[in-house]
Image: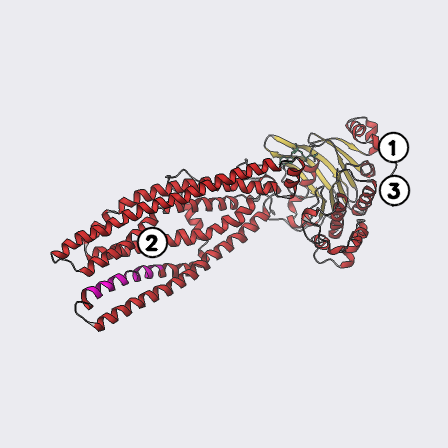
Amino acid sequence: MARDFSSGGFGGGLGRGKFKFDEAGGRPDLSRALLLRISKYFIPYWKQTLVVVLVLSVSAVLGLLPPILIQQIIDHALPDKNLRLLVLLVLASLGTTVISGLLGVLQNYLNSFISLNIVHDMKNQMYRHLQQMPLQFFSEVKQGEVITRMTSDITGVQSVFNNTIVNFTSNLFILVSTAAALFFMNWKLALLGILVVPLFIVPTRKMGNVRWKLAKQTQEKVSEQNRIIQETLSISGYLLMKLFTRESAEYRTFTAINAEATRLQIRESMAGRWFIMFLSTFTSIGPMLIYLYGGILFIQGELTIGTIITFVALLGRLYGPVMQMTNLYVDIKRSVALFERIFDYFDMEPVITDQPEATPISAAGKSILFDNVHFAYQPDKPALRGISFTAAAGTVTALVGPSGAGKTTITSLIPRLYEIQSGTISIGGTSIREFTLESLRSQIGLVTQDTYLFNGTIRDNLLYARPGAAEAEMIEACRAAYIHDFIMGLPEQYETIVGNRGIKLSGGEQQRLSIARVLLKNPPVIIMDEATSALDTVSEYYIQQAMHSLLANKTGIVIAHRLSTIVAADQILVVKDGMIAEKGTHDGLLQQNGVYKALYDKQFEPKVFSDPPVAE
Ligand code: ADP
């Protein structure tokens, strides 16, 4: 089922790690559609696949030869004292083994070639697909789940190919060829040998079920353990744990889960032990029956010794594949679950894509218009209800209002991080849907409260905005953002590593760095979410100067938290409950004595009389 993100259609299902472990015993849901979909990945490698099938069938037949050659040795070469025949048969036996070995190597190579190439193709496809997913996807998906699907799930496909598909085909060929050989040699003995098969099918299935259940429980414990690791050993989780002194509690939870996982794993491996003990008893019953009944036939002169020995040897080739195929359904179930998890992701449609007629458009010198825009993250919970305003080219619009009013949402809609439900957003009279996404986003510089810095050097972080930028341009941007001098004061200057998410820099420095990055990109539209965190006056001063550089001659939309920004804005929009409650300039709005006035009195008045910050 395709999912629709435009109306927050995740339904929460994603976050729960959709492991579709059915209760054991149920039929795996290997629908024809799923099979067809899986087989499509083999199309580019059909030649190699064909060779693998051929090699498997030849190997199955070759495997019959050594026992048959032994029969010839026992029944003919030895009684006839025929040395030439003996040497010939032994050499033939050796030859078969060597050829089988060589085929094995070829098959191994092809297995790896096909499976790893399919993994490679799927990874590329998944990465591209996830890049197209809307922002909401990443805010709703459980942490770590994307990585799991990209790595262990897709890599699991390799073992599905090697262990499930190849094993099944190989066992099938061995089974059919061996059964045919047995019946050809002596149908009565063949029937006797097959009679015991149900004896070990039943315990094999039973044990398979037990192991499946245990594996499922272990898997759950391991995921839980991974979740704790991810939550507590990441920067924010670690800080949270330390600040609330939850180490001992987290450690207790971790050790408890760890103990449970270990206990389950021991049980799982022991279930296997008992199982093998029972099976080896049952599998030896077949040969004993052959020796008994075959022996009687030999005494009656109906059978040769060679036939009895060959029969027993071939019986082993029959039982092995039967046992492996008995548990095949567990493998198939696991594989179906794996593919469903992968396809689940592929089926989520990136709703925000280029329209067919979209063209690259420039936003330079154009106004931004919101016309009666409605938007909801979740159905029936509107975040924006009829937003209309114009941000004229080259002016700064400040958004103010209580937390949760919808300010961030308004700014997220301009680069189409979310799709609006009704109304229009246009730039220079052209709906933003008619822009190609790439051109639209290239026109917008976003400075968020959370500064997205990656763990590289300051230079790497800056050049991410424009990889080809010259050194002088980079320095100019940093000067304009009032961060150059700070950077030059660092021991390694532009080569300084900023740490995970920029943790080695202060909040003010991070924000100035991200302003410099947007200055380097130099887009005509700037969207800024002013940091709410309290800064010292000097930092604040620098940020204000940096913002001034950033917004000069640009169309700016700023979620404003500082009075200075608000006062300097060309227009102020007071957002409340997803609507624009008031619109105007600072003075005009104060005179209206409405929502803005109340907000101003509550948030800003005490600061009005403070001295303007002074630079050092
Ligand atoms: P503001 O920026 O004014 O503080 P937001 O635009 O962030 O407000 O939020 C407006 C409303 O939308 C709030 O009720 C908030 O809970 C909700 N909201 C914000 N982001 C999301 C999201 N990704 N998914 C669902 N609801 C959201």
- Point out which mark residue 171 bears: 2
Q: Which residue is mark 1?
A: 609
* Numbered circles on residues, count: 3
Mark before the other along the chain sequence, 2 or 1:
2
Quick one: label 1, few (<14), some, or many (20+) residues within 10 Å? few
Is 371 located above or below residue 129 in the figure? above
Residue 496 drawn at (x, y percent): 73, 54
Label 2 with label 1: CB-CB less than 8 Å: no
Residue 358 drawn at (x, y percent): 63, 48
Q: Which residue is mark 3?
A: 614
Which image quadrant is residue 87 in?
bottom left
Quarter of the image containing the C terminus? top right
Disc 3 marks a residue whose amino acid type is Val
Q: Where on the image, by quarter, is ligand 1?
A: top right
Q: Is residue 351 left or right of residue 425?
A: left
Magenta segment includes 349: no
Q: Is residue 507 left or right of residue 259?
A: right
Mark before the other along the chain sequence, 1 or 3:
1
Q: Nearer the viewer, residue 342 or 261?
A: 261
- Residue at 22%, 58% (x, y): give it: 309
| Span colored in magenta | 56-74
Is 183 located above or below residue 406 in the figure? below
Q: Using the rendered image of the protein, determine whether residue 446 is visible from the camera's viewpoint.
A: yes
Q: Nearer the viewer, residue 6 or 267?
A: 267
- Badge 3 element: loop
Mark before the other along the chain sequence, 2 or 3:
2
> Which residue extends farthest left?
300
- Distance from the alpha carbon under mark 2 to that under mark 1: 86 Å
